Image (spheres, helix red, strand yellow):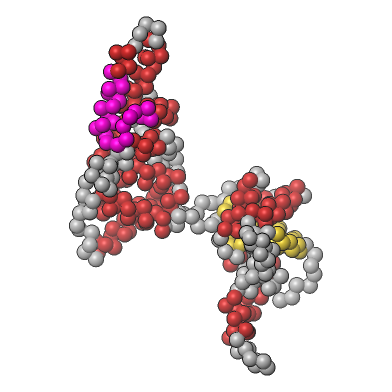
Amino acid sequence: LRIETSEGLRIQGGPVGMDLGRMVAREVKNLHDQGVDPDEVLLAFPRWDDQAEAVCEALRAAGLPIHNAAPKALDRDPGVAAALQAARIPAAWRPGEEWEADAVVRLLRNGRLQPDWDEKIDRLALAEAASALRRLDVFRGRRRILTALAREIARTEEAASESERERRKRKIDQARRAHSIVEMLIGVLEPLNHPRPRSGHVAELRRAIDALGIGRSESRALEALWDAAEDRAEVLERLGRDHAEIPWTDFVDELADLAAETDAPPSPPAPGSTRATLVDDLPGCRAGHVVLAGLVEGSFPRRAAVQPFLALRPGEEPPADARRRYACEALRFARALGAADRGAHLFYPTTDAKGQPLLRAGFL
């Protein structure tokens, strides 16, 4: 393949990181200003790395709609993070350290917590309960938290005077609601803290998360977590290792590791957004404009395709396999450019974070 003209081709360089990201964002914004629809712009990277994240962040900061298809771990999903947050509350890694008050406060303030216990328990009631807990001189222990709340109610009632009656009444009502909410939270989470087989832990946690309303609005990531946990439990059961009961703390540790290792299901791109993907996913794609960013040395061609040539002695012919591999890299580059109908915009980092010069991709 031969590129006959440079019309529509732009090559720019800038310092690595957010500086290069802003350059890409400015170019994409210029395309929008020229009347190019956002979904007619395709953004591609050689790999998902810090530079790719910086470019996507720069586009978001500029208010440009972008769909980032980078793989994300399940524990970065808000619903999964809230589920793990709830699971850790009844867990005691050392005696007497379960039900930390700060952990309960963080869960009550988490927007994913949407229990269907009482029509009066809304986001405001949960936030007020969190504020009431923050005022207590209790650090951990479910019974100590409830006792402190009951003491707060009694002390507020005794101290109420005629001039402060209305203000004191509000504090009493807030403390009573907090006491009721913590009691219901204990009723949901406390049964988790018992030894069971892994499959039993998964079933109990799913029950608790459903009761707390976590993931009610968007449960795809949570379903992926349950599937992964059940698959692991099934494999261990086939190996004869899941019949033994394990402590809740061990299960929570395993679940957290599993969530960090498992990719979340990709979300579909929103209409009218610029899509970000990998260069190797471009074959077969078409877009009005293709933006390739982060074209540092080793991206086009990749180092593995160049190394056989570096090992040649003077006058020695490269083997056919090496030539074929290098030709595949050239075809890969041509396909990336050929995905664009009207314009290709190539960006490469000129210096690293310390200001040291960087080499751009060889094909540039």
Residue 248, image x, y percentages: 26, 49
* Residue stretch in magenta: 133-154
Residue 349, image x, y percentages: 67, 62
Image quadrant in which the N terminus is located: bottom right
In the picture, measured across the screen, residue 162 lies left or right of residue 321, that is: left
Q: Tell me what residue is drawn at x 36 percent, y 39 percent.
A: 103
Image quadrant in which the C terminus is located: bottom right
* Tally of numbered discs: 0
Residue at far bottom of view = 315
Residue at far left of view = 244
Query: Up-down: is 179 above or below 20?
Result: above
The answer to whether residue 35 is visible is no
Residue 249, image x, y percentages: 28, 50
Q: 297 or 152: nearer the eye?
A: 152
Query: Up-down: is 322 above or below 33?
Result: below
Query: Up-down: is 207 above or below 156?
Result: below
Q: Is residue 143 magenta?
A: yes
Splitting the image into 4 quarters, where does residue 92 fall?
A: top left
Q: Tell me what residue is drawn at x 62 percent, y 84 percent.
A: 310
Q: Tell me what residue is drawn at x 24 percent, y 66 percent.
A: 239
The answer to whether residue 34 is visible is yes
Which is the main secondary structure of the residues drawn in magenta?
helix
Q: Tell me what residue is drawn at x 74 percent, y 75 percent.
A: 2
Splitting the image into 4 quarters, where does residue 242 fall?
A: bottom left
Q: Is residue 331 magenta?
A: no
